Image (cartoon, rainbow, N blue to C red):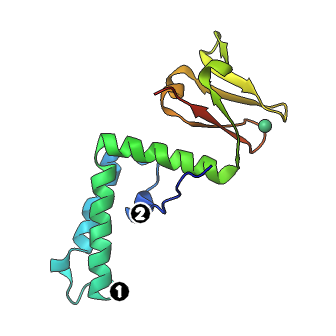
Amino acid sequence: MAFEQIPKKDWYSILEADPSASVSDLKQKYQKLILMYHPDKQSADAPAGSVEECIQKFIEIDQAWKILGNEETKKEYDLQRHEDDLRNMGPVDARIYLEEMSWNEDDHSFSLSCRCGGKYSVSKDEAEEVTLISCDTCSLVIELLHYR
Ligand SMILES: [Zn+2]
């Protein structure tokens, strides 16, 4: 198994925001920061650090907003983050197709028993997008394979 682990930046922390922040919150943070680090503003009242650092920061803030200020790219990034979190939680225990999970009519979700006795479950809507599912009891993760 060789999925590439590209180091990614935490765009939320660059904007000094919480991942649960709303887009308008993010926008406010972005506007405040981008002004603070704007190269034109680098004078006596500049934040601590060299001019280069400020420019670097300015570019990062701008990139962060490009990703988080756009609904599509934000969604993609959030999903990626979620999967990274799961990957950090534990190794992938199994790779399965959705068809191998059992369908629960009650809550419209798919589930699979984990060997710890816990359960992996994913809602019908989530199953379309999610590729990693964590056990509700232990730290094991399964990868959901999609026919493409
Ligand atoms: Zn488990």
- Does any portion of residue 101 appear in the rendered image? no
**Which residue is more in the foreground, 90 or 19?**
90
> Which numbered circle lies on residue 48?
1
Vertical comparison of 94 with 39: above or below: above
Vertical comparison of 141 with 6: above or below: above
Mark 2 / mark 1, whichever is N-terminal: 2
Picture coordinates of residue 138 (x, y %)?
A: 78, 41
Mark 2, residue position: 16
Indicate which quadrant contains ligand 1.
top right
- Does any portion of residue 60 appear in the rendered image? yes
Q: How many marks?
A: 2
Picture coordinates of residue 108 (x, y %)?
A: 59, 15
What's the CA distance linking mark 2 and mark 1? 17 Å
Residue farthest along the right direction in this orientation: 116
**Which residue is more in the foreground, 24 or 124?**
124
Quadrant housing the C terminus: top left
- Report whether 34 appears left or right of 119: left
SS assignment at label 1: loop
